[in-house]
Amino acid sequence: MSSVVLTGIGELFTADPELGVLHAAALVVEGSRVAWVGPARQAPAADTGYDVAGRAVIPGFVDSHTHLVFAGDRAEEFAARMTGTPYSAGGIRTTVAATRAATDEQLAANLARLVDEMRRQGTTTVEVKSGYGLSVADEARSLGIARHVTEDTTFLGAHVVPPEYADDPGGYVDLVTGPMLAACAPHARWIDVFCERGAFDADQARAILHAGKVKGLGGRLHANQLGPGPGVQLACELGLDAVDHCTYLSDDDVTALADSGTVATLLPGVEFSTRSPYPDARRLLDAGVPVALASDCNPGSCYTSSMPLCIALAVREMGMSPAEALTAATRGGARALSRGDVGHLGLGASADLVVLDAPSYVHLAYRPGVPLARETWLRGRRAGL
Ligand code: NIG
Ligand code: FE
């Protein structure tokens, strides 16, 4: 197994609570793993050396919430929203029609384009949901395609009720929990439900998550995005790994999150792109709730793939410090996906890291909109940039 020592690291943000932030540091990669981290002057020898010339190094971002299998876009809907038309869950059906009409090759090519876009911005782990097929065949093929780019695939047949079931939502839930789940479970690690007015209620969400659990899938929820609702409480009651959006929270919701340890995944790109109030990350952190940041990249509510943008928004608009935001975008995302191997640069971690064109990680929020990811390393190898 070959090894490389990264030297000249001006600042190393490990996202490992024991190691913290190091200055004048070095890091040894052996094969695909981090084998040593510490002060540069104590660095052990390795097969090769690689000098990053004083730049900052951070863990690769863990984007724990995306919807990347789709066709088309909704630029006109976005433009209308910016002149006053409110966002609603119904727009999802536009993308469902385009996705059903696309070939497998078109869907795979669009997915590959977006994953590549993410890599270039420093994302090294990405969760990908289905949810724009909404038929047995279209959900199963969406997940089959997603499986090629990530092990963290999520079955989201319960995104909205498709038009052909508009008069029979109960029949659609039966389809999701029956034949659709049977076809999708082999391609998925997780099951998710959009628990919101206009989508699925708490009873439906409970039934769908239960059916997924029986098939061995972990549960996650979209909840409390468009208004207050029962989703966050349900996620905490069921002990889910994560509940995502969390824009409208009551005091009881915050207490339930703190008590359950369920990760609150905040998606500030959505509030930016739907011109909505941002979630109060400070309130969650002060209550001891584990927080993750993710992009929610999708063609409707938020068409950004940029984790640095999410960090900048979280710092500027949501009361997070730069360190808290970067931790949420790395270790927090990993926790939301129940992954101990990524999202930090402690010993034994996957050598997924980003060399920034900056002397400090703080620049991620301090220099919003600037492409700071100079190099992305994935499992010990520099991604072709
Ligand atoms: O996470 N909230 C539900 N689903 C997506 C939006 C999907 C869409 O508008 O196409 C979200 O925001
Ligand atoms: Fe989403």
Image: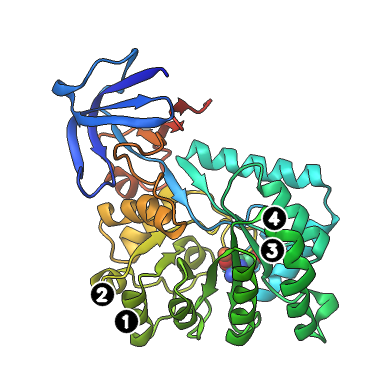
Choose between 351 and 385: the one closer to the eye: 351
Choose between 36 and 224: the one closer to the eye: 36
Q: Quick one: label 4 or label 3, which is nearer the N terminus?
A: 3
Query: The residue under label 3 is which amino acid type?
Result: Gly
Query: Residue 68 appears at what percent x and percent y?
Result: 64, 52
Q: Quick one: label 1 or label 2, which is nearer the N terminus?
A: 1
Q: Residue at x 39, y 35 (%)?
A: 354
The image quarter containing residue 211 is: bottom right
Query: Residue 105 appears at what percent x and percent y?
Result: 79, 42
Query: The residue under label 1 is which amino acid type?
Result: Thr
Disc 3 target residue: 131
Please state if 39 lies on the left or on the right of 12 as rendered. Answer: left
Q: Residue at x 33, y 86 (%)?
A: 251
Mark 1 to mark 2 CA distance (whole Å)? 7 Å
Query: The residue under label 4 is which amino acid type?
Result: Pro
Q: Quick one: label 4 or label 2, which is nearer the N terminus?
A: 4
Disc 4 target residue: 186
Disc 1 target residue: 255
Mark 4 to mark 3 CA distance (whole Å)? 16 Å
Mark 3 to mark 2 CA distance (whole Å)? 33 Å
Disc 2 target residue: 287
Q: Quick one: label 3 or label 2, which is nearer the N terminus?
A: 3
